[in-house]
Image (tube, grey):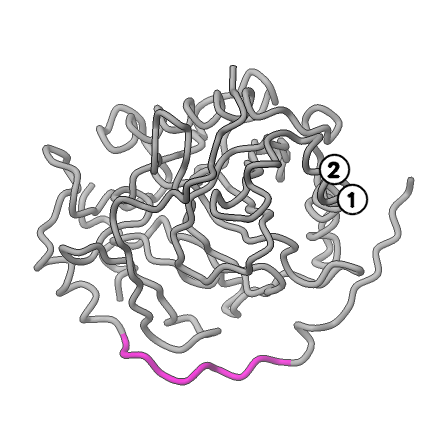
Amino acid sequence: MLNNLRRFISPLKPLNLSCRIFSKMAYSIVEKGSLFSEDYRVFFKNENGFISPLHDIPLYADEEKKIFNMVVEIPRWTNAKMEINLNECLNPIRQDIKKGVPRFVPNCFPHHGYIWNYGALPQTWEDPNYVDENTKSKGDNDPIDCIEIGYRVAKRGEIVQVKVLGTVALIDEGETDWKIITINVNDPLADQINTIADIEKHYPGLMKATVEWFRIYKIPDGKPENQFAFNGEPKPAEFALKIIAEVHEYWKKLVSREAEGKNISLVHTTLADTEGLISTAEAESLVSNCPSPQPSKSVDSIVDKWHFIRLKY
């Protein structure tokens, strides 16, 4: 139902994190429809009412210390392909649909589902009109992707405060698709992990597995292996922070209409003097029109099938 309203409105230093850092604003979620179905949605609220996770949640939890808010779309070890929906008003999380069927990412042995908490940084946008000077490819029209490597399995729709450790640059079907590597600032190892080298020290093999996962996860669907800029080598935190700053500026141009996105709803409830602003009452009405929560749909056991990938090298 919301789909019909898509046009409604047109040098880093190690951080001392011994004190826990919490979001300055509390967020909650409201689920609608049936999990694993086309009508499933996860809407977001702050203390005033419904919001857009893309536009209304600040990028920074603490800008001075470079601590970011991450919107968790997919908890570790799960494979339902959930994502912030750009086309719909208030940009709820929903399951990606492929040929009319909810999409599940294949389990590519030995990886089961996603091997980290996976999500996006709010108030970012990889501009498809811009050719990245590092990758020589245009942006993918999405918020920038974020993986969180801490020990705890997060929840879908959770807002986690993270610090940046580095990035890898996936070239996904000819488009730049940055993957920002982070750790929850409340993780017990957060003080000890500040660089890519620290990841290898404390989580040996994780970076190799990360590149492999992104390289092969589309092969079972009949697509070629993904390619990377920099031969798949991760770039450091300083580099990643520059990329985040760039895509944050692209988002600012998007919401100010200085740049045009492809079918992106700009509807939100907190950004003053912007075209997409609606009242909390209007947002409440939009969400109330969605199907009420229902039991989860059954899932075909085929989604748990193991796929064994033989690469040419």
On-image quarter of the N terminus: bottom left
Residue under numbered circle 2? 200
Type of amino acid at the residue the image marks with label 2:
Glu
The residue sitting at 25% across, 60% down in the picture is: 4
What main secondary structure does the magenta stretch of the protein show? loop
- Horizontal side of residue 182 vs 202, given as left or right: left
- Measured as percent of width and height from the top left, residue 66 is found at 42, 29
Residue under numbered circle 1? 205
The residue sitting at 41% across, 85% down in the picture is: 295
Type of amino acid at the residue the image marks with label 1:
Gly
Q: How dense is the environment of label 2, judged by Cα within 10 Å: few (below 14), some, or many (20 and up)?
A: some
| 293 inside magenta stretch | yes
- Measured as percent of width and height from the top left, residue 73 is found at 46, 56
Write down the region rendered in magenta.
Answer: 291-300
The residue sitting at 11% across, 55% down in the picture is: 280
Secondary structure of the residue carrying numbered label 1: loop
